[in-house]
Image (tube, rainbow, N blue to C red):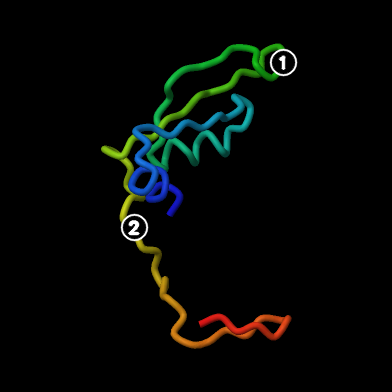
Amino acid sequence: MVHDYAFNQIGLKKLLALVRSDNYLALSLDLRAGWKIETLVRDMYGDGVHCFVLYMKPEFCRWLNHTPKGWRVPSRTIVCSDNLSVE
């Protein structure tokens, strides 16, 4: 969804993400999701705490045109708490 908006609707050629070097879980998750390392900014967050700059391009983005399982458009009217109805 975010990838589709960025690449297909806005027309960006590259997305960037900043990840702290001591955030092992986020870095691991991002790399497994297909993000690649662009560069490393040393000591950005303090002595010995660096910043990984990750990037994603549409050519290798597996999330483009992805529809999550169970995703559907509501087929009925939704009534909001302030009595406004949304079709």
- Location of residue 7 in the rendering, given as x and y in whole percent from the top left corner: 36, 43
Rendering quarter of residue 36 = top left
- Location of residue 64 in the rendering, given as x and y in whole percent from the top left corner: 33, 50
Check the image and report above or below for 64 versus 73.
Answer: above
Q: Earlier in the sequence, mark 2 or mark 1?
A: 1
- Location of residue 30 in the rendering, given as x and y in whole percent from the top left corner: 47, 38
Q: Classify residue 82 as left or right of residue 1.
A: right
**What residue is at 34 percent from the left and 57 percent from the top?**
66
Residue pointed to by mark 1: 46
Between 27 and 7, the residue placed more toward the observer is 7
Check the image and report above or below for 3 versus 87.
Answer: above
Residue pointed to by mark 2: 66
**What residue is at 53 percent from the left and 87 percent from the top?**
77
> What amino acid is at disc 1?
Gly
Other-residue count near label 2 (Cα within 10 Å), few / some / many at <14 / 14–19 / ≥20 = few
> What amino acid is at disc 2?
His
Check the image and report above or below for 22 versus 30.
Answer: above
Determine the CA span between mark 2 and mark 1. 38 Å
Q: Residue furthest left?
A: 59
